Each structure stands twice: as structure tokens, then as C-alpha cells.
Image (cartoon, rainbow, N blue to C red):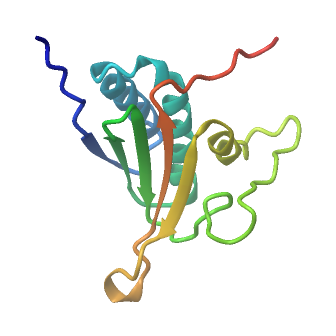
Amino acid sequence: MVTVATPHPWAYALRLPHDPRAVRVARVTVRAALDGHGMQDAVDVVELLTSELVTNAYRHTDGPASLRLTGLGDGRLRVGVWDSDPRVPAPFGQSGDGSAPLAPAGAESGRGLGLVREYADSWGGWALGDGALGRGAGKLLWFEVGGRAKLPLLRK
């Protein structure tokens, strides 16, 4: 008789300095963690979406960021990125219809949150309470994907 244990939930957390190289470090970390947990099918999507959130944290704040990867034990993965800006952008905010405006054709920026909306199974964001001296404690943006998330083939 063979007993198969269900996978246990797991988590990794990484503190990222306000440094443009932090985006690459986040991508390498995602790839290593997912490869190590047998989630190779999800690597491309998770690496892309994580890169977008960490890039936004770098571009729109002056402080550090944090990345947390959580394997939920049912083939799903949750990725959270914290930064020090308390403003939660669409489509992550609680108000509105959850849509992000599309970036104009040829734009060099502005597509990241739309990519999250397109390829993640779910997403959200929270402004995090009051910090020391009445300042906001930033925000957490997160997304989830299933274990078999894949990017579509790109047409040339």
C-alpha cells in the first residue's frame, strides 16, 4: 500500500531594498521557489506578474518593499508585495468595477496591473492601517494563480 500525503502549505518572504536590482532578485527568487516546489507550469506567469508589482513598488515609492510567496497546498499560489505607499491602485482597490485603464498603443509603461488582471485568477489590495506617528503603513497588493497558469503564445 502506498500513502500519498497532500502537499503542505509553504511560504517564503523576502525584504527588497529600494534598488532597481530588486526586481531581478524577486524574479530569481520566484523561479527558484516554484522550481523547488514542482510548480514549473506557473513560473512564467508568476515571474511576470511579480516583476510588475515589484517594479511598481520601486517606481512609486522611496522605501523598501517585501515579497511573500505562499503555496496554498492545493496547487494554488498567492504572491503578495508590500510597499510603503498607502494608495491602492485600480484594479486592486475596493471601489469601482475592478477595471484598469488600458495603456495607449506604444506606451512604455502602464500595462503591469492590466497584466495582473488578465493572467491572475484573483487579486486584491489593502491599505495597511496607521503606522508610527500617524503615518500609513503602506499597502499590500496580492494575486493568486493555479498550479497550471501559463502565458498564451505570443503572435509575431
At 46% from the left edge and 37% from the top edge, which residue is drawn? 23
Taking the view exactly as shown, the residue that stands out farthest to the right is: 105
Taking the view exactly as shown, the residue that stands out farthest to the left is: 1
Residue 37 placement: quadrant: top left
Residue 143 at x, y = what percent?
51, 47
Number of marks in the rendered image: 0
Residue 113 at x, y = what percent?
65, 47
Taking the view exactly as shown, the residue that stands out farthest to the bottom is: 134
Q: Is residue 61 above or below residue 8?
A: below
Q: Is residue 63 above or below residue 118?
A: below
Q: Quadrant of the N terminus?
A: top left
Q: Quadrant of the C terminus?
A: top right
Residue 99 placement: quadrant: bottom right
Residue 90 at x, y = what percent?
68, 60
Towards the viewer: 90 or 64: 90
At 18% from the left edge and 26% from the top edge, which residue is drawn? 5
At 55% from the left edge and 51% from the top edge, which residue is drawn? 123
Q: Is residue 24 above or below residue 141?
A: above
Towards the viewer: 125 or 145: 145
At 50% from the left edge and 37% from the top edge, which residue is drawn? 145
Residue 22 at x, y = what percent?
41, 40
